[in-house]
Image: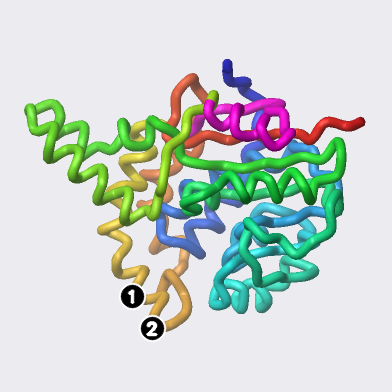
């Protein structure tokens, strides 16, 4: 299955805002992904599958989404405070409490890779979508592990076993259960009656290295979040100028034939 490369509407202010509100490595990835949704078909009602704390919906979409679903209470409480979903539901993606054919669009950004058994979730997505409805989602792909900079360096000096141990450690840190190929995603979606309309890889080795090294460098942000409820204590332009200068080239990079992540738009056929 060959990728397609749509024209992406870049929103520089989106990147700057993400840096003010998230750890830098997460801000970079979410800014890239948020731009993908700007030109996609989004018929309503819209279900945000794995909505989390609602931040992504807040910075990505100009109007509140209809429904947000998540299995965790704590982020749902934050999502309620943000008010970017008209209705929030505490439920598992494999047992959605919605009638069949009730949504025109389902979005799920960097969620499916955290679900050990994803097929029942895909079945539910297909069930709740209207005929002609869309399923837009982002996941890490097989190149995620291949692009990890520390593992690549260990491979180059002949320490393949240590490189694999590092990859497994990063899998646990990221809570990734799998890295499916585009063809495998196409097969699994087809099984539940969804057709892939377009897909593309994104996030270069350099961008992933920024995300990778951002994990240990972002530990102060994790502490700040626990203590104050905010990721950044001083979210001012002067404090973020160097970070933005270093990372903006990864935000601006064009889509190519490879990438650590994959974005899909699938459709439920109309009768």
Tell me the quadrant of the picture where the N terminus can be found.
top right
Q: Residue at x 44, y 54 (%)?
A: 26
Left or right of 197 in this view: 167 = left
Residue 103 percent coordinates (x, y): 83, 51
Number of marks drawn: 2
Assess whether residue 186 is covered by the magenta stretch.
Answer: yes
Name the residue: 24% across, 37% down: 149
Mark 1 touches mark 2? (CB < 8 Å): yes
Count neighbours of disc 1 (C-alpha within 10 A) and say few if under 14, some if 14 to 19, many if 20 or more: some
- Residue that mark 1 sits on: 223
Q: CA distance from mark 1 to mark 2?
A: 6 Å
Q: Position of residue 87 (x, y in %)?
A: 77, 70
Magenta stretch in the rendered image: 184-203
Percent across and percent down for residue 161 are: 12, 36
The residue where tag 2 is placed is: 227
Identify the image quadrant of residue 59: bottom right
Residue that appears at 31% across and 54% down: 172
Give the x, y percent position of residue 205: 35, 32
Q: Residue at x 64, y 72 (%)?
A: 79
Q: Which mark identifies residue 177? A: none
Q: Is residue 75 magenta?
A: no
Viewer-side residue, 208 vs 97 = 97
Q: Which residue occupies the foreground of this view, 214 or 196? A: 196
Q: Is residue 80 above or below residue 114?
A: below
């Amino acid at each position: 299955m060959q990728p397609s490369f749509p024209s992406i509407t870049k929103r520089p202010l989106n990147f700057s805002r993400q840096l003010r509100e998230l750890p830098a490595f997460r801000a970079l990835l979410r800014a890239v992904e948020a731009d993908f949704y700007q030109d996609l078909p989004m018929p309503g009602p819209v279900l945000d599958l794995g909505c989390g704390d609602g931040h992504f919906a807040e910075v990505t979409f100009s109007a509140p989404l209809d429904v947000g679903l998540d299995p965790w209470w704590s982020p749902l409480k934050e999502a309620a405070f943000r008010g970017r979903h008209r209705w929030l539901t505490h439920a598992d993606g494999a047992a959605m409490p919605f009638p069949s054919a009730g949504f025109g669009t389902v979005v799920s950004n960097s969620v499916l890779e955290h679900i050990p058994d994803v097929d029942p979730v895909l079945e539910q997505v297909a069930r709740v979508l209207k005929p002609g409805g869309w399923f837009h989602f982002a996941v890490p792909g097989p190149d995620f592990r291949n692009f990890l900079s520390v593992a690549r360096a260990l491979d180059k000096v002949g320490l393949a076993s240590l490189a694999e141990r590092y990859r497994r450690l990063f899998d646990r840190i990221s809570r990734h259960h799998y890295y499916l190929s585009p063809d495998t995603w196409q097969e699994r979606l087809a099984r539940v009656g969804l057709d892939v309309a377009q897909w593309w890889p994104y996030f270069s080795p350099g961008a992933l290295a920024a995300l990778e090294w951002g994990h240990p460098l972002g530990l102060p942000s994790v502490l700040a979040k626990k203590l104050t409820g905010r990721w950044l204590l001083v979210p001012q332009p002067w404090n973020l100028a160097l970070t933005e200068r270093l990372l903006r080239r990864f935000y601006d990079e064009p889509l190519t034939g490879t990438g650590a992540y994959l974005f899909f738009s699938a459709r439920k056929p109309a009768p």
